[in-house]
Amino acid sequence: MHVGIFTVNVMVHKHIRAEKSKKGYLRFASYLAAVIAAVIAANTKSQEAIESGT
């Protein structure tokens, strides 16, 4: 789990360095939103599994 978060951080920092234009920033923002949505969805699924398991 922590390795995945670290990998995403590295990807994000490389992306920020590579994309300095406004268009690049907008594309990065939508990419980041997709990553956050995926993380939230995964957390929600695991939370539901924990609640249904008890």
Image (cartoon, rainbow, N blue to C red):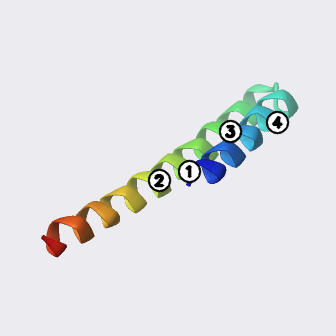
Gap between marks 1 and 2 measured at Cα: 6 Å
Q: Which residue is mark 1?
A: 35
Q: Quadrant of the N terminus?
A: bottom right
* Residue denoted by label 4: 14
**Residue that badge 2 annotates:** 39
Asked which secondary structure carries label 3, the reply is helix
Label 1 to label 3: alpha-carbon separation = 11 Å
Find numbered disc 1 in the image and state the secondary structure of the residue it sits on: helix
Q: Are marks 3 and 2 in contact (CB under 8 Å)?
A: no
| Residue on which disc 3 sits | 9
x, y (%) of residue 44? 31, 59
Q: Residue at x 59, y 42 (%)?
A: 32
The residue located at (75%, 39%) in the rendering is 10
Mark closer to the observer (4, 3):
3
Which residue occupies 39% across, 60% down? Answer: 41
Q: Reading the chain from its start, which is encountered first: label 2 or label 4?
A: 4
Residue type of the residue flagged with mark 4: Lys
- The amino acid beneath tag 2 is Val
Please say if the residues under marks 1 and 2 sit with CB atoms less than 8 Å apart.
Answer: yes
Element at label 2: helix
